[in-house]
Image: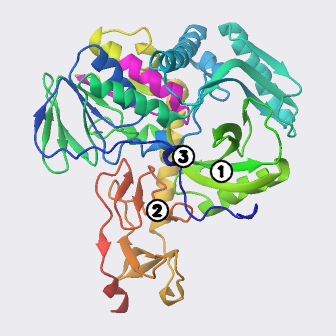
Amino acid sequence: MAHSQLPSQSHSYWRDTASIKEFPPLDTSIDTEVGIVGGGITGITAAYLLTKNNINVTLIDANPILKGTTGHTTAKITAQHGLIYDEIIQHFGVDQAMLYYKAMDEAKQFIENTVKELTIECDYRKEHAYIFTNCEKWQHDLEKEKNAYDQIKIKSELLDQMPLKIPMKSALQMKNQAQFHPLKYLTALLDASIKNGLNIYENTVAVDMDDNRTNPSIITKEGHRIKCNYIISASHFPFYDRDSFYFTKMYAERAYVLAVQSAKEYPGGMYINAESPTRSVRTTNWNGKKLWLISGENHKTGQGKQTHEHYKALQAFADEHFQVKSYDYRWSAQDLTTLDKIPYIGKLKKSQPKVFVATGYRKWGMTNGTVAARLLSDLIINETSEYADVFNPSRFKADPSIRKFTQINTDVAKHMIKGKLDNTNPYIEQLQSDQATVTRINGNRAGVYKDKENQVHIVDTTCTHLRCEVEWNSGERTWDCPCHGSRFSYTGEVINGPASKPLQKIDPDELTK
């Protein structure tokens, strides 16, 4: 492959190099003690912890296991979540910031201990983590973050140089963090959980919940019920959001990853810059070689420039700094950010003590997802956790929550109005293979995609969640909602919530009428 050529398809290195078992869909109603919706790091880790305690657990996923956000991560196991600790101290105090760090540090240690306990071959390796900047105005923010580290007693150094030789003015190092192959780790946890009695059903879509305070039930798309003592919603966006309005309290962002081979020798470490656009760098082993993972280009889902341009921006960065020999993989991920950047982990709502939620990991899912699994398992087994207040989904405070709430929902209103305006293309006959456009059919806005075999697929572009208009994602060949982050395949099927119903399909014959 020429060094300038990006892969034509989005495909995760993690999924390509892990042996993931297949599981049947649920075809009947069942009873269980704990029902878990979502087969990523939170759901699988929670299942492992609960089954170790002889609790009967059933885990379902709308797709094949580990196909979602966990399968598309950069897989850094770190408590360094960008510039977060000074912000937590300012909003919630030193004690809460210390608890946040302690939860993340214990999650990192849990992963290391589990790798050793189960002798998991998952390329686990300790690395120092670095936040760096090449911008003078961000140097002050790194200094404030270093002061926050000192208050929390995090081992760190503020440096004027770092092992990775790219332009920088300052870097904040957090020592002894780690990285691994997430799917090799989680498939080992799955195997151990199955031996402990875990029941798994994939391609099983949870669409509703019977909100019984004693024995709530998960209701699937086919109408089957999973009657539970407890439910854990670990499905990226909560599968059940009636009366809780989580879609108003989070926003969805996408980020992009290139996996490349370089002529340079990798110096060790995991790196991310403080400013925008985001640039993150780490490596992984691949057939005896080093594969560099270069990621970033965060943006709100369904908004901004053509998505393929984000890959090109990362490609330009890699070509400039890393003597790239080949581009071997590209993929993207989506994650949710909460009002105050701290995940929502705990009771889905105050009125329902048996249903728990874990969401809003802000792209730091390896530690946040592990924290969530441990916290929710503790609440089920012991009815208490020292971290419950830190991550409580009902914790909202006036500062910063109300300000952020207003900002998020003003943005939603702007994009809802913008999407209804006439920005359509009447010249459908000019559409090339593997291209999409928006037009009007019988006066209604419609999305048209012509695949590589020149077959035409048409959908109504009105999102089935709250009727915003979806936009074409050229990098992933999906229709993405700019309001709340729902994503649909080019045939209209739901990929990411909060939408639970597919886009309406339109017969291609309508184009000729």
Q: Disc 3 designates what residue?
A: 253
- Distance between mark 2 and mark 3 Cα atoms: 15 Å
SS for dot 3: strand
Task: Using a 10 Å C-alpha cutoff, classify the residue at mark 3 as few (fewer than 14 neighbours), some (14 to 19) or many (20 or more).
Answer: many
Image quadrant containing the C terminus: bottom left
Residue depicted at x 80% and y 54%: 319
Task: Using a 10 Å C-alpha cutoff, classify the residue at mark 2 as few (fewer than 14 neighbours), some (14 to 19) or many (20 or more).
Answer: many
**Magenta-drawn segment:** 354-376
Which residue occupies the foreground of this view, 387 or 196?
196
Residue depicted at x 68% and y 7%: 153
Give how far across and how far down residue 142 sits, in percent.
Answer: 77, 25
| Labels 3 and 1: the sequence-earlier one | 3
| Amino acid found under the numbered disc labelled 3 | Glu
Give how far across and how far down residue 408 sits, in percent.
Answer: 51, 43
Task: Using a 10 Å C-alpha cutoff, classify the residue at mark 1 as few (fewer than 14 neighbours), some (14 to 19) or many (20 or more).
Answer: many
Label 3 close to label 1 by CB (< 8 Å): no
- Along the horizontal axis of the image, is 2 left or right of 205? right
Image quadrant containing the N terminus: bottom right
